Amino acid sequence: MKHFLRVLTQLLVFLYCKCLWRGLKFVIRKLTGRCELQRICYNNKPGARRTLKIESSLKCSKHELLQSAINAHPDSVEKTIDDIMSLKKINLDTNPQLGISLQACLLQIVGYRNLVVEVEKLRREPYDCENQAHEEMLMKLWKELRPDSPLSGRISKQWCEIGFQGNDPKTDFRGMGLLGLHNLLYFAEHDKATALQVLHDSLQPKHSKMSKAEWDKKKFDKAIGYSFAIVGINITDLAYSLLVSGALKTHLYNVAPEMPSLVHFQQTFCYLMQEFHRFWMEEDPCDIMEFNRVRTKFHKHVLKQLKNPDMALCPHFTATDLHLVNL
């Protein structure tokens, strides 16, 4: 019986999408004198709410031109908009704002797709200790986070001080490749005060009345906090999963006027690092063994926020004021 009801539901949805909905759109166009793209642009403010609806409309269209528009090259977006206006018989002279709005939406759509490709490329590129550029980035990360502590050598236990697991950080980048290093370095450079504070807090025991001198004698890998660099790589994985699943469209379509870029993704990572740190403290876990539980709960928390098309991470990236805002 359940199987029958499921099949019936799917059939009704199919009929609605293929017949009733298209017929309804035809009637609405005749009554309003506007096509679906016009109605979306005129009835929704710029941002995710409008762009997501435009994206859905293009995907579901029966016209090949409209379906292929979301895969247009950035350089051909303007021509694609002209072709759409011509197909829909819309006069550009009497609807100048429509072309501008559609172009902004399409740039966001193709920009998001290109950003996924760029991020995936960085994720797939392994850290290579023979690559001078990779080594320079790693050394720069150390200098940003430990400016007053010279590194004794490339292979050193000191790496544990900033949250790597062993003497050679390259082994920790396996899961996220260069993407993890790029994000950590961006955080350390562009939100340095917050990064240093998070690093400092992560090294402290949860409950302790010991003096600083007593704490300094303890080994860093015995802290009841968490490993800063390892968590950064893990949060990179979280940000990556939000991006490829499309969940970040809400945020990026709201904060990027046109094409989302790698910088937007890295700023999102900085926000997630700061928010996870706050979330970790609020959850008050017993020890690091609860990390996966806290991370999963945090992931669900972020997903819930991003389901609101008017919600975005703070549109203006600052070192100390990153939070969710309702646009």
Image (cartoon, rainbow, N blue to C red):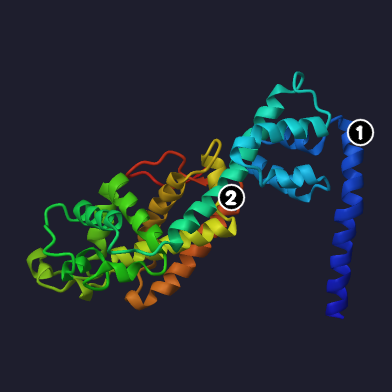
Q: Quadrant of the C terminus?
A: top right
Verify CB contact (< 8 Å) between mark 1 and mark 2. no
Q: Quadrant of residue 175?
A: bottom left
Task: Give x and y (percent) for residue 205.
Answer: 22, 70
Callout 1 amino acid = Lys
Q: Mark 1 — residue?
A: 30
Left of 146 or right of it: where is 323?
right
Task: Give x and y (percent) for residue 123.
Answer: 44, 61
Q: Considering depth in this image, is 260 or 269 the residue closer to the camera?
A: 260
Q: Mark 2 — residue?
A: 113
Q: Quadrant of residue 131?
A: bottom left
Residue at 13%, 69% (x, y): give it: 215
Task: Give x and y (percent) for residue 165.
Answer: 27, 72
Task: Give x and y (percent) for residue 311.
Answer: 55, 46
Q: Secondary structure at mark 2?
A: helix
Where 185 falls versus 213 (above or below)? Answer: above
Residue at 47%, 40% (x, y): give it: 315
Q: Considering depth in this image, is 35 or 298 the residue closer to the camera?
A: 35
| Residue that extends furthest to the bottom in the rendered view of this protein | 1
Give the mark count. Answer: 2
Q: Considering depth in this image, is 298 or 94 the residue closer to the camera?
A: 94
Callout 2 amino acid = Arg
Q: Quadrant of the N terminus?
A: bottom right
| Residue that extends furthest to the front in the rendered view of this protein | 130
Left of 182 or right of it: where is 204?
left
Where 325 falls versus 275 (above or below)? Answer: above
Mark with earlier residue (1, 2): 1
Q: CA distance from mark 1 to mark 2?
A: 34 Å
Left of 256 or right of it: where is 229?
left
Where 281 falls versus 24 (above or below)? Answer: below
